[in-house]
Image (cartoon, rainbow, N blue to C red):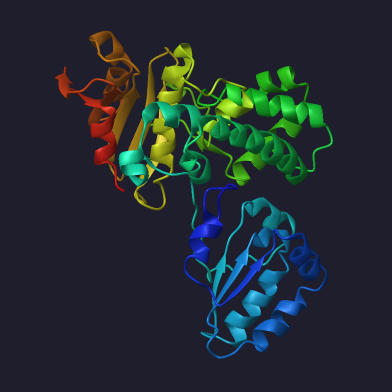
Amino acid sequence: MLGPRQVGKSTLLASTTPDISLNLASPRVFRDFVAHPERLERELLAAPPSARTVFLDEVQRVPALLDVVQLFLDEHSGRFRFLLSGSSARKLRRGQANLLPGRIHVHQMHPLLACELGGDFDLDRVLAHGTLPGIYAEKDGALRAADLRSYADTYLREEIQAEALVRNLGGFSRLLDLMAASSGRILNVQSMCRQAGLVYETARRYIEVLEDTLVMFRVPAWSGSTRASVVGHPRLFLFDTGVRNALLRRPFDAPLPDERGILLEHFVACELHRRLRTLWPEAALFHYRSRAGAEVDFVLEMGRDLWGIEVKAGHRVTRSMLRGLGSFAARSDRVRRRIVIFLGERRQLLDGVEVLPLGDFLEELPG
């Protein structure tokens, strides 16, 4: 189970009541097992027959423990069921860990979906504070804001710096701020390099670290069959709107009026991305932009079918807002749905385009 910090990995896996648990985030436990990973083998051999489930929390901190897991899967097949959690696949690869190919199922965990919040869903709160479970559950808005700033400064700026083996701390911090400010926009690494004072290869590596730690995700460009006439650069999004706001020192009492559209689009991106490979394994997510400037915020590809999705933060939709969807539909006969999400209350049909209230669109998504 992989995912950023505080999305609930440990809470979820601990709720299965494992018989043996190691929390490698504990300094004492970490010291014991990083020095002597073979100790796990001895402890498992000594476990009573009733012990069946083993939970290794933050396993990326001691990658050598995966060799012990493979030993038991090979030589004591069926004896134990292993639950492993981590916040960084990169650390496992960098540590030349045994990734147990063909022997494990890998799942990703994200902040909460709107459907998981149910009646507690509040759009303004989600746009301002995001949906990290512990932070969203906090009733006091001032404490939620303080927790988000701590998360941004302590975890992202310090732990991710360590993850990236950062030497240029100032450059990494500037790049992180630029990535937050550009979240949702088409990625221009060259421009970010100039602004952050970093060489291209260093900036590219830092961006890979943010993706590997699941702090950012990439929405690639949809090219179709006429690649030369579309923009091929991806868009990158931070994994949570609240973390984005904390990095940029935005006010938390309400989103800035000129950022509401950006945050709503960001929220929809997260709702779609978090379903890929799990609730919606047949779907792939893209964006569309022609070289003439026509854009569609999101393209969902499901087998042969395509959906074009635009996000508008207003309460009304006009024909002038449909240009991008028209350009996209003209490029492929596979387009089955053209959708505009807006903040109005009732569905509409405008020149064959479905105009859906946000809540109606979210109800159509698998959950």
Q: Position of residue 336 (x, y in %)?
A: 22, 34
**On the picture, is 316 further left or further right than 56?**
left
Q: Is 112 placed above or below 75 here?
A: above
Along the viewing direction, whichever of 279 and 358 lies nearer the viewer = 358
Q: Is 126 placed above or below 257 here?
A: below
Q: Is 259 placed above or below 222 here?
A: above
Q: Position of residue 349 (x, y in %)?
A: 15, 21
Is any part of residue 239 visible from this angle? yes
The image quarter in which residue 294 lies: top left
Q: Position of residue 135 (x, y in %)?
A: 52, 40
Q: Position of residue 160 (x, y in %)?
A: 71, 41
The image quarter in which residue 260 lies: top left
Along the viewing direction, whichever of 199 and 22 lies nearer the viewer = 22
Q: Residue at x 80, y 27 (%)?
A: 170
Is any part of residue 226 visible from this angle? no
Residue reaching furthest to the bottom: 49
**On the picture, is 120 further left or further right than 244?**
left
Q: Residue at x 45, y 28 (%)?
A: 127
How many numbered circles are shown? 0
**On the picture, is 84 further left or further right than 133?**
right
Q: Is 97 placed above or below 19 here?
A: above
Q: Residue at x 66, y 25 (%)?
A: 177
Along the viewing direction, whichever of 146 and 154 lies nearer the viewer = 146
The image quarter in which residue 26 lies: bottom right
